Image (spheres, grey):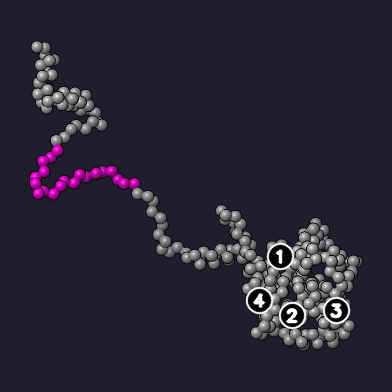
Amino acid sequence: MSKYQKLRNEISKIEGSKGIAKFYSGALFADTSWYTATLDEPEIEEGSAPVALSTTVEEELPPQRPSAEGSPSKAEVLSSLAKKIDEKGAVQSRFGNITKDEKAISLGSKLILTKDQSEYKKWIESNLSSFEFEKFEGVSALIVGESRNVDLNSEQAHYKFSHDNTELLGKMIIPMKLEEGEFLRASLLGDTDAEVLQNLLCEIALFKPKAVISLGAVATNFLYGKKEKLSKIHGQELERIIEIGDESINFTLFPIFHPDLLEINPSMKRTAWMDLQKVMKFLGKI
């Protein structure tokens, strides 16, 4: 019998038919780092606790979100956003530009009239005997801010209500299809800003116009309630409220660029005409 056959016979006696496989696997792979030899399981005595196998594999945990403690509330975030929009006019976000709704915001903006309307009316009538207040009650458009007068004795007339195609504003009114009696042009009247505002509010309360057109930034800021760039709000339909004691009067304000600016910068005339068309649509003229 050869040595090889003798070796095979000896190996087969170890564990029956599994002996050869164990021999060769051990001989071939025992020195390799990834080979794990078959180990005999330890004998566990009856009644003893099971042996826990330790593992070195660390579980990969998902990244934890930062704690919400100390984060601003929803109300604080919205308040901060509103403040930035109020300062800048618009805030960019991944959803697009966020702007304020001027019409919605102005609904809550109120102007306080403290001056006596009846006394103001008597003062106007005593100085402008030819002017009839009743003729212009419910006028379609009250156009304010063309000029500023300290008092009624100024060279420039406080009220204008006739078509005049010799000046730019007159040329702007005619295409609006406003007949004489449907519009009234009024200057800013008063020595101080506070006086100008009260006189403006008196006239709006007395005439109750369907629309108030403010010419330029000065007149617009009086009725808008704060200083704002006209470039941001021109042509917008702004709902305003005048508080008179326990009563209130609503009016609609349309800011447009002043005719003097249009004379200096004719390229703005198209923009001004587009703004006036919005007034026409509001009044049912188109």
- Which of pointers 1 and 4 lies earlier in the amino acid sequence? 4
Q: Earlier in the sequence, mark 2 or mark 1?
A: 2
Identify the mark nearer the N-term, 3 or 1: 3
Residue 45 on the magenta segment: yes
Q: Which residues are magenta?
A: 41-60
Give the labeled residue for mark 4.
Answer: 110
Label 1 crowd bin: few (<14), some (14–19), many (20+), radius 10 Å: some
**Relative to 11, residue 98 above or below:** below
Q: Label 2 amino acid?
A: Ala
Quarter holding the N terminus? top left
Q: Is residue 33 left or right of residue 149?
A: left
Quadrant of res 244: bottom right
Residue at 73% of width from left, 64% of height from top? Answer: 235
Element class at badge 4: strand
The mark found on residue 154 in the picture is 3
Question: Mark 1 = which residue?
Answer: 236
Q: Residue at x 90, y 66 (%)?
A: 165
The percent coordinates of residue 251 (x first, y second) are 72, 74
- Amino acid under label 4? Lys
Does any portion of residue 196 appear in the rendered image?
no
Residue sitting at the far top: 1
Tell me if residue 93 is in the magenta stretch: no
Label 2 and label 1: CA atoms lie apart by: 21 Å
**In this orientation, which residue lies closer to the viewer: 4 or 229?**
4
Front-lying residue, 91 or 18 = 18
Q: Earlier in the sequence, mark 2 or mark 3?
A: 3
- Amino acid at dot 1: Gln
Badge 3 element: loop
Q: Nearer the viewer, residue 82 or 18?
A: 18
Quarter of the picture containing the C terminus is bottom right
